[in-house]
Image (cartoon, rainbow, N blue to C red):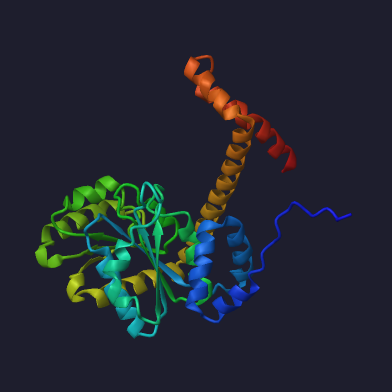
Amino acid sequence: MKSRQSTDAPIKNYDNLIQHFLDRDKKALARIITLAENDPEAARIILSKLCRHIHGAYIVGFTGTPGSGKSTLISKLVTFLSEKGFKIGIISVDPSSPYSQGAFLGDRVRMREIILDPNVFIRSVASRGRLGGLAKAVFDIAILYDAYGMDYILVETVGAGQSEVDIFRLAYTVILVTVPGLGDSVQVQKAGLLEIADIMVINKSDLGGDFLKINLNMMLDSYTRQRSWRPPIIRTIATDGKGITELFQAIQEHREHLELSNNLMMKKRANIRYRLQSLIESYLFERILEKLSITKKFDNLIEKILSGSQDIYSAAHEILQPLLKKVEKSL
């Protein structure tokens, strides 16, 4: 008589892959990033083994309206950093296909001049419809880049304007890229990006920018009264590499400001808190929906709401109340 096998799936062993990763094998890095994007359980196992290897890479976020030249600016900055011997990991968050949910990879096309640089690794990530400008996997990829040994992690958001604030939850220095003639300062103020920007860049400044700089300075006079750091305004022409040295200097000055004021550690704590809360919400949401799908309770509640026999708030309360009682007893 055959012994009964366990129905539990076996825990995969990623030790060999992790060792290649720690040996700075880019293929292993790419493989682990793919696992982190698509397999939450694999991400949990791998990150638990790599957390001790995190050394504190500095994360810089780039946001701004589409067409402002973020990709070109990043490409020139990466070349500058690589020539100084730094290792750089790039995360480009592209709009996703509504059908395949895959990334367009447009940023990788625009950064083709640095793809073969041995000090550089680029990963394009689909936003998958997520508001805030960042995909969920971006936070995990940043940790993996850090454990891999990157000195700088550069994150480029989708560039969707009013949905860009997520970058504030990840990057230590946020760079807002603007250009003359695209709504100028009005778009910046309307999108709420001024509050999260640590450095402002007027790119394509050969097209002008004097009036835009005046307007940005006027807005900064009121926005920065309660901040100890006033965002500098850097003028660049990314296609020609002009202003890149000044941009790097501004990044370093902001980093020193954060370190000396202890704000860098505070920001790291806040980022971890946000990510932890997001993970808990995600896990709970998925488990609840899975259970509701099996029991058909979700569909039944929808029919009641459609018929007018129940309102949507009491339906949500009916689902959550038993769960909340169990959570309260266990804590």
Q: Is residue 115 left or right of residue 140?
A: left
Q: Is residue 308 above or below residue 233?
A: above
* Residue 183 placement (x, y as % from top left): 17, 50
**Quarter of the image where the N terminus is located:** bottom right
Who's the residue at 35% across and 55% down the image?
A: 196
Q: Is residue 190 left or right of residue 277?
A: left
Q: Is residue 331 above or below residue 158?
A: above
Q: Is residue 266 visible in the rendered structure shown here? A: no
- What is the count of numbered marks? 0
> Which residue is outermost to the front?
1
Q: Is residue 1 left or right of residue 104?
A: right
Q: Is residue 297 above or below residue 290?
A: above
> Which residue is outermost to the right?
1
Who's the residue at 20% across and 48% down the image?
A: 186
Q: Is residue 97 visible in the rendered structure shown here? A: yes
In this rendered view, identify the residue nearer to me: 164 or 129: 129
* Residue 95 placement (x, y as % from top left): 34, 53
* Residue 228 placement (x, y as % from top left): 37, 61
Q: Is residue 256 above or below residue 129?
A: below
* Residue 50 placement (x, y as % from top left): 60, 70
Who's the residue at 29% across and 71% down the image?
A: 111
Residue 218: which quarter of the image?
bottom left
**Quarter of the image where the C terminus is located:** top right
Who's the residue at 14% across and 58% down the image?
A: 180
In this rendered view, identify the residue nearer to me: 290 or 243: 290
In this rendered view, identify the residue nearer to me: 138 or 55: 138
